[in-house]
Image: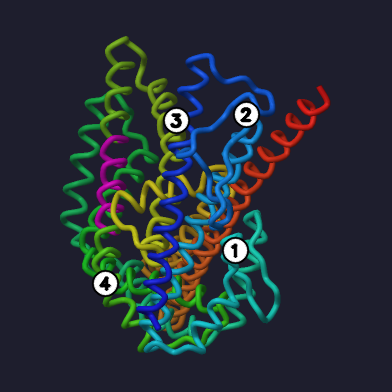
């Protein structure tokens, strides 16, 4: 069955390629005639050569272009063909993947064909007639809760098996050597002092937190590239199965993971390089700005304000980078792209939806920071009593942190589906508006 679908897709691609070549021939001929002054936009004024014809809807009859309006109509049809070809290729690739995973089951293929609309590229749930549309952050959160309630058992397994171990090690900082953290903090404070910044408690805490975060990320990198990456892929797969009304199957998931693991790891490595590059650029820029104001002669108290402005601007830009990286991981699971291509695809996909992504990132960051602060105050630091409450507060906060990570990954996946649907609808809207404009111009020309 998979071979038949592959042959069918190749045949459709060859047919569309042939039509596109015919369009190119027509456009070139029209351009040469217009340049030579032979083209007159009136019925019968342009006699197309016998070789320059258009095969309409795959029939054997050839129809020559008679005027410029007809050429514009064919341009609009050509744009529709390109959109349909891109959407149908994505659909065929997903159907092939399902065939391979289901062992060539015809029932699963029929179900997949019913669940996906090849004309619009919007996934439709047969159970609830669910369609993707442009959503704000609150609607995405509601959709996340709905999916979590629909398939709570599967997501609970992901939390317990894949997310909780990483969250426990990340919050407790067991793998972090505090002596190394102190040395890195001292060096950062020396750089800040040489740049003209005053060593206030806020700057000291910021340097210490940055040192702990950097060393923790480096220590937990093996866990990030295994457990964390597997959890993200499992969440994306679970959300996709929920929308396609398919039952979660661990064997199918691991079969898919074996196929996509290489591109998933490659995308994650590129994400890490982009994040490290952005943080390095921020430190260099911050030191440069502080040194410039120090050389000019500004007092150290005033140098803090331009440094804060640089930090604020960087925070917004860094949030956009994190959103692009999160969507790139989702893309590498659902689409056959990886590495820089996935990042570029992610950046193009979220255009027009950046505000929604920023709100999602802000909510997730605030939730994680809140749980981290509670863990620091209630578990790591003995701030009250004899510390016996750590026995139940520690695991509870780890579970809370894991749920925040789960919600963040689910919202990123739903945000991907929303952005993809919005882009498809915008392309179809542009094509429809172009057709309307052409029809109006044709009507006015006919009246004249």
Which of 58/187 is in front?
58
Report, in whole angstroms, how far the alpha carbon at label 4 lies from the one at label 2. 59 Å
Q: Are marks 1 and 4 in contact (CB under 8 Å)?
A: no
**Residue named by callout 3:** 28
User: Is 47 left, or right, of 163 in this rendering?
Assistant: right
Pointer 1: residues within 10 angstroms few (<14), some, or many (20+)? many
Where residue 272 appears, x then y in whole percent? 27, 53
**Residue named by callout 4:** 226
Residue segment shown in magenta? 268-282
Q: Are marks 2 and 1 in contact (CB under 8 Å)?
A: no
| Residue visible at 48% across and 24% down in the picture | 31
Is the residue 181 above or below the residue 111 in the image? above
Question: At numbered mark 4, what does the secondary structure look like: helix, strand or loop?
Answer: helix
Answer yes or no: is residue 232 visible: yes
- Mark number displayed over residue 122: 1
Where residue 310 appears, x then y in whole percent? 41, 30
| Residue visible at 30% across and 64% down in the picture | 264
Which of 219/95 is in front?
95
Where residue 20 appears, x then y in whole percent? 45, 46
Is the residue 52 above or below the residue 365 in the image? above
The answer to whether residue 42 is magenta is no
**Residue named by callout 2:** 68
Pointer 4: residues within 10 angstroms few (<14), some, or many (20+)? few
């Amino acid at each position: 069955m998979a071979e038949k679908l592959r042959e069918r897709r190749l045949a459709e691609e060859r047919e569309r390629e042939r039509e596109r070549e015919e369009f190119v021939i027509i456009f070139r001929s029209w351009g040469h005639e217009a340049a030579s002054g032979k083209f007159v936009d009136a019925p019968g004024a342009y006699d197309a050569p016998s070789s320059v014809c258009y095969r309409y809807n795959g029939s054997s009859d050839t129809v020559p272009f008679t005027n410029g309006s007809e050429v514009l109509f064919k341009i609009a049809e050509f744009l529709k063909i390109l959109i349909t070809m891109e959407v149908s290729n994505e659909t065929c690739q997903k159907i092939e993947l399902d065939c391979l995973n289901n062992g060539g089951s015809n029932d699963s293929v029929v179900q997949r064909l019913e669940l996906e609309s090849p004309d619009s590229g919007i996934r439709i749930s047969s159970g609830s007639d669910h369609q993707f549309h442009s959503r704000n952050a609150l609607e995405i959160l509601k959709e996340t809760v709905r999916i979590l309630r629909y398939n709570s058992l599967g997501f609970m397994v992901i939390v317990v098996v894949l997310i909780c171990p990483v969250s426990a090690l990340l919050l407790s900082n067991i793998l972090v050597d505090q002596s190394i953290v102190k040395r890195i903090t001292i060096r950062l404070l020396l750089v800040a002092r040489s740049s003209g910044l005053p060593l206030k408690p806020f700057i000291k805490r910021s340097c210490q937190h940055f040192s702990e975060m950097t060393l923790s990320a480096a220590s937990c990198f093996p866990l990030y590239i295994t457990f964390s990456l597997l959890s993200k892929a499992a969440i994306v797969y679970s959300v996709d199965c929920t929308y396609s009304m398919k039952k979660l199957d661990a064997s199918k998931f691991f079969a898919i993971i074996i196929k996509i693991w290489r591109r998933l790891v490659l995308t994650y490595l590129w994400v890490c390089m982009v994040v490290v590059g952005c943080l390095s650029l921020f430190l260099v820029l911050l030191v440069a700005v502080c040194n410039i104001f120090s050389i000019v002669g500004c007092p150290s108290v005033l140098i803090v304000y331009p440094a804060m402005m640089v930090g604020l601007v960087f925070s917004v830009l860094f949030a956009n980078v994190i959103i692009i990286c999160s969507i790139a991981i989702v893309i590498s699971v659902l689409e056959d792209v990886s590495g820089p291509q996935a990042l570029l695809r992610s950046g193009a996909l979220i255009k027009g939806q950046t505000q929604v992504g920023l709100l999602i990132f802000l909510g997730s960051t605030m939730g994680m920071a809140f749980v981290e602060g509670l863990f620091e105050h209630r578990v790591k630091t003995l701030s009250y009593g004899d510390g016996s409450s750590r026995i139940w507060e520690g695991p509870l906060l780890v579970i809370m942190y894991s749920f925040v990570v789960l919600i963040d990954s689910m919202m990123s996946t739903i945000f991907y589906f929303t952005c993809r649907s919005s882009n498809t609808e915008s392309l179809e809207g542009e094509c429809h508006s172009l057709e309307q404009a052409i029809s109006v111009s044709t009507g006015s020309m006919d009246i004249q």
